[in-house]
């Protein structure tokens, strides 16, 4: 689904017209237009909660609440990708859910480097807040890989963050892989 503006009809479609189970879900693919995740949050949560294979979200402006809620809603998919998105989270995050995560791969491809407030190179704490939230929930048990391709973060720094929080078994990489369907 390609989105250029905030449209109530798209949000309504996401909330009411999505099947209860999907293998793949793609939102805002091939778009350079940044879209507020807050505007579509309820619809996206409904749309992705039944996805089993991959959720691919592109060009989103994500605050703490939106990132938390989308990661939780996508807990049953194998792969979750945030592509070209700006992530603004300066405080602790909470990814805890009542069931167990099934997410094996989490990607932040070309994300966190807007040159605005989410530039992870200037503030590594933003990404470390994500790492801390992972280690405090069942996502740490299912997660096998985290991809930080072109995110302005040195791969060694990210690996150190995961090791520091006891998650050295997770493959931290910066491979360019986009499988959006």
Image (cartoon, helix red, strand yellow):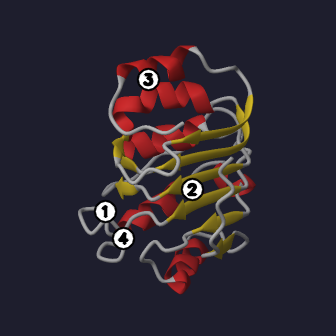
- Residue at 33%, 31% in the rendered image: 6
Task: Find the distance from the CA under tag 1 to the CA under tag 2.
Answer: 19 Å
Task: Find the distance from the CA under tag 2 to the CA under tag 3.
Answer: 28 Å
Mark 1 is surrounded, within 10 Å at the Cα level, by few (under 14), some (14 to 19) or many (20 or more) other residues, namely many
Disc sitting over residue 11 in the figure: 3
Whole-percent x and y of residue 147?
Answer: 61, 68
Q: Residue furthest top?
A: 16
Residue 113 in the figure: left or right of residue 81: left
Label 1: state its secondary structure: loop
Residue receiving disc 1: 118
Label 2: state its secondary structure: helix
Residue receiving disc 2: 134
Task: Find the distance from the CA under tag 3 to the CA under tag 4.
Answer: 30 Å
- Residue at 31%, 72% in the rendered image: 123
Asked if marks 1 and 4 touch (Cβ < 8 Å), the reply is yes
Which mark sits nearer the N-terminus, 1 or 2?
1
Front one among 87 and 127: 87
Task: Find the distance from the CA under tag 2 to the CA under tag 4.
Answer: 17 Å
Locate the N terminus and report the quarter of the image it occupies: top right
Front one among 55 and 98: 55
Task: Find the distance from the CA under tag 1 to the CA under tag 4.
Answer: 6 Å
Task: Find the distance from the CA under tag 3 to the CA under tag 1.
Answer: 25 Å
Whole-percent x and y of residue 181?
Answer: 69, 47
Mark 2 is surrounded, within 10 Å at the Cα level, by few (under 14), some (14 to 19) or many (20 or more) other residues, namely many
Mark 4 is surrounded, within 10 Å at the Cα level, by few (under 14), some (14 to 19) or many (20 or more) other residues, namely many
Disc sitting over residue 120 in the figure: 4
In front: mark 1 or mark 2?
A: 1
Mark 3 is surrounded, within 10 Å at the Cα level, by few (under 14), some (14 to 19) or many (20 or more) other residues, namely some
Q: Is residue 63 visible?
A: no
Asked if marks 3 and 1 touch (Cβ < 8 Å), the reply is no
Asked if marks 1 and 2 touch (Cβ < 8 Å), the reply is no
In front: mark 3 or mark 1?
A: 3
């Amino acid at each position: 689904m390609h989105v250029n503006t905030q449209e109530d009809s798209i949000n309504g479609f996401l909330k009411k017209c999505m099947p209860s189970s999907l293998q793949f879900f793609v939102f805002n693919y091939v778009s350079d237009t940044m879209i507020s995740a807050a505007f579509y949050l309820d619809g996206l949560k409904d749309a992705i909660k039944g996805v089993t294979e991959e959720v691919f979200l592109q060009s989103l402006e994500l605050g703490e609440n939106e990132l938390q809620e989308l990661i939780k809603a996508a807990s049953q998919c194998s792969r979750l990708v945030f592509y070209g998105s700006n992530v603004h989270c300066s405080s602790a995050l909470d990814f805890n859910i009542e069931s167990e995560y099934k997410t094996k791969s989490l990607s932040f491809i070309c994300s966190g480097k807007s040159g605005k407030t989410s530039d992870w190179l200037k503030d590594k704490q933003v990404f470390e807040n994500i790492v801390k939230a992972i280690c405090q929930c069942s996502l740490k048990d299912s997660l096998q890989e985290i991809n930080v391709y072109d995110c302005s973060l040195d791969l060694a720094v990210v690996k150190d963050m995961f090791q520091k929080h006891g998650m050295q078994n997770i493959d931290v990489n910066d491979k360019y892989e986009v499988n959006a369907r």
